[in-house]
Image: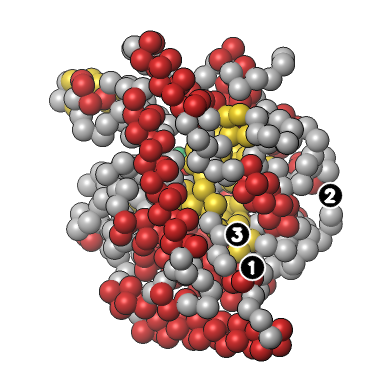
Amino acid sequence: MTWSPNSWEQRLQAQEVIYPDRDALDAVVRKLQRLPPLVTSWEVERLKSYIADAQEGRRFLLQGGDCAETLDDCVSDIIANKLKILLQMSLVLIHLGKRPVVRVGRLAGQYAKPRSKPTEVREGVAHPSYFGDLVNRLEFGAESRRPDPTRMLDGYQHAALTLNFIRSLSAGGFADLHHPEYWDLAFLERAGISDELRARYQDYTRQLGEALEFMEALGEGSFDDLTRVEFFTSHEGLNLRYESAQTRHVPRREGYYNLTAHLPWIGERTRALDGAHVEFFRGIRNPVGVKLGPTTTGEDAIALARALNPDNEPGKLVFITRMGVDRVARGLPGLLSAIQSAGLRVLWVCDPMHGNTVKTESGVKTRSFNDILGEIRRSFAIHKDAGTLLGGVHFELTGDDVTECVGGGLGEADLDRNYASACDPRLNYRQSLEMAFALGESLGQQPKRPASAP
Ligand code: PEP
Ligand code: CO
């Protein structure tokens, strides 16, 4: 089948959003097609080259942010705090892992959510489920849950506002590696962090400052390119109306770019080989992520890799495994050996969140810090045995003091104190920083090149 930005319409679409007003939908799509892109092909290609490095062990990918961003959370503090925790985690990973870290936020567009049930019933009343702020509203009611296409314009605008703030902060010195103290220490005081962790973090930032001074003294100049911190964006490319409306040719380049985000990904529920999402994603030039859950077979993984990256291009494909701590030993080795023996290029990333969701006795969705860390540690060990590399991690986290995951200072009784997620439970600031220290230790032991090149 010939690919076009709309060829997916010929395929079955899992998680399809049915918009009752077709004319309104068409008007929104036309508007989105005319608006300027959120990201550029230059940035997309740069990220692809970094992912290619990460496939060879020369970089490590840190991807993180909310399960579901909301339009209401497009607030300076919340965005800055997310940026800070990602920067701090990356610093810890650079220090302990001894390699550059590529930072990719689940932000500026993570507004669409797949749901296990299309409708939600409360006290005998049924309405469509909440599919994320890009589609409808969280509030339970006929009006608020009706899919409204104009929310795609709201989503686009809020993504643009978020990106604008992130770009300004990065350009304005907030993310300058010379000044990790901006990222910042007042913040460290607030979060009930242990003295030991605080001291370690402060020690790292001091060493980093000294190392930069030393390098600059040697070169008698400044290392602008080395010390400016880059951020990339990602979200689940679930709503194909939104994604395809922003997919276009750019001058002097071949092919089509999805310019809503640098790294869009396909979710576990929408990765059917003959489905609409794989059809759409196979035609874009962006690097593409795919979530792989515990039922994925080696043949599935090979077929997806061939469909999404037929030329076996470096940096193009990111497989994000999300097995669960108890299933990773059964699910992961077969995928690694299948992809390896087929000679296919993939960046292996561990999402230790989505296979480890549990409900407490009182019915609250949570995840345990130990299970999350457990899946990461097991994944490192499985990759080591297979001679492959774990090239990145994917977290649901926030820079705020929420109480959604247990462990790292929180018990079940704490969960209702500040449970703020619109969807899945996120690591809070302290849990995220502790996770970075624990993860960094495993990363530091991983070789910097694969045992066997593809
Ligand atoms: C998610 O990343 O929020 C998500 C829904 O993940 P998955 O597709 O892996 O279930
Ligand atoms: Co989630």
Q: Going from the N terminus, do you reach mark 2 or mark 3 first?
A: 3
Residue at the spot of label 1: 225
* Residue at 29% from the left image edge and 52% from the top image edge: 75
Amino acid type at image mark 2: Pro
Amino acid type at image mark 3: Val
Amino acid type at image mark 1: Asp
As drawn, the label of residue 454 is 2
Q: Going from the N terminus, do you reach mark 3 or mark 1 first?
A: 3
Dot 2 crowding, Cα within 10 Å, few <14, some 14–19, many 20+: some
As drawn, the label of residue 253 is none
Find numbered disc 2 in the image and state the secondary structure of the residue it sits on: loop
> In the figure, residue 76 lies in which quadrant?
bottom left
Residue extending farthest left? 123
Find residue 103 and report its horizontal and vertical position in percent. 55, 58
Q: Is residue 305 above or below residue 428?
A: above
Quadrant of the image containing the N terminus? top right
3 or 1: mark nearer the eye: 1
* Residue at 66% from the left image edge and 89% from the top image edge: 217
* Residue at 47% from the left image edge and 69% from the top image edge: 173
Distance from mark 2 CB to nearest ligand 1 atom below 8 Å: no
Find numbered disc 1 in the image and state the secondary structure of the residue it sits on: helix
Question: Is residue 218 toward the left or the right of residue 177 in the image?
Answer: right
